[in-house]
């Protein structure tokens, strides 16, 4: 996938769900993975020509694992002239050493988002952009149906009233396969997560299940995504385009 195509998908999501307003100060959550780096490229590119003017910052919550070297991402942000903040935490130690969690992902995500949102507000941002793509949205729906018994997936735009902060997901129309193509084409400086639970989660199970369904029934993921868009899920904004 070329940058122009990524920008086209991103702008479509931004326009469909009014994700960006004039004067926004948007923090991009950077995990170090391919998705968040593609989002950095997307919003940095969109900023150059989008009619509504907005500011960008980038932020990473460092969980404290050894070997998590963010120097390549720091360099990329410097080249793009996007301010980059690294939040140092002991979340990894708390989860794996102090509490010895057998199912660490939920608590880790909660603590990570708490640290992220608190710093984002301190940086003066009113929105935070997550790099969830089309596959993430489908996989979340599968997880919700299998383990919670409800038809749900996260929204393109969510207002967190306690934080007075809006979460946006501008890559919702981008497929993971396209992100992989973009990563390879532009040689994104991906930083692998050193977390020992990486790849052994319920989300990984949902990813493999969605892939299997799509192999056995070609186009199944596209149809599931369409069902989500048309599903009148509570909390989802109406499309404005």
Image (cartoon, grey):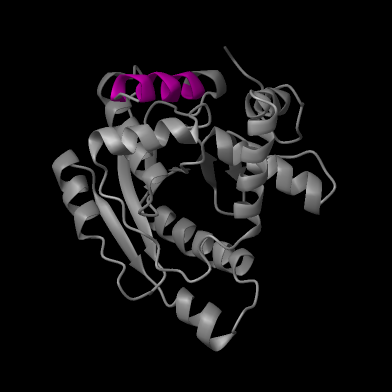
Q: Is residue 29 left or right of residue 139?
A: left
Q: Position of residue 241 (x, y in %)?
A: 57, 12
Task: Evaluate whether residue 55 shows in this view.
Answer: no
- Seen at 65% across and 53% down, the residue is 205
Is 12 or 190 nearer to us in this picture? 190
- Seen at 85% across and 47% down, the residue is 149
- Seen at 29% across and 37% down, the residue is 184
Q: Is residue 92 left or right of residue 30?
A: right
- Seen at 48% across and 36% down, the residue is 176
Residue 145, by quadrant, is top right
Is 143 or 153 nearer to us in this picture? 143
Which residue extends farthest right?
149
Which residue extends farthest front?
216
Is 116 or 132 nearer to us in this picture? 132
Q: Is residue 239 left or right of residue 127?
A: right
Q: Position of residue 181 (x, y in %)?
A: 36, 32
| Stretch in magenta | 3-14
């Amino acid at each position: 996938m070329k940058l122009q195509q990524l920008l086209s998908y991103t702008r479509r999501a931004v326009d469909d769900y009014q994700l960006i307003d004039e004067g926004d100060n948007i923090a991009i959550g950077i995990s170090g993975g391919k998705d968040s780096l593609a989002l950095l490229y997307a919003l940095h590119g969109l900023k150059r020509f989008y009619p509504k003017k907005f500011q960008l910052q980038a932020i990473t919550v460092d969980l404290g694992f050894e070997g998590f070297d963010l120097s390549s991402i720091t360099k990329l942000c410097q080249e793009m002239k996007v301010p980059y903040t690294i939040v140092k935490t002991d979340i990894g130690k708390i989860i794996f050493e102090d509490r010895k969690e057998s199912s660490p992902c939920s608590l880790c995500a909660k603590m990570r988002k708490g640290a992220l949102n608190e710093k984002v507000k301190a940086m003066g941002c009113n929105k935070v952009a997550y790099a969830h793509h089309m596959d993430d949205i489908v996989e979340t729906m599968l997880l919700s149906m299998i383990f919670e018994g409800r038809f749900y997936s996260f929204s393109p735009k969510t207002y967190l009233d306690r934080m007075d902060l809006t979460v946006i997901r501008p890559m919702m129309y981008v497929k993971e396969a396209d992100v992989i193509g973009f990563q390879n084409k532009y040689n994104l400086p991906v930083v692998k997560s050193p977390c020992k639970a990486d790849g052994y989660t319920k989300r990984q199970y949902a990813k493999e299940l969605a892939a299997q369904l799509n192999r056995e029934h070609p186009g199944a993921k596209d149809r599931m995504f369409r069902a989500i868009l048309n599903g009148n899920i509570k909390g989802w904004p109406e499309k404005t385009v």
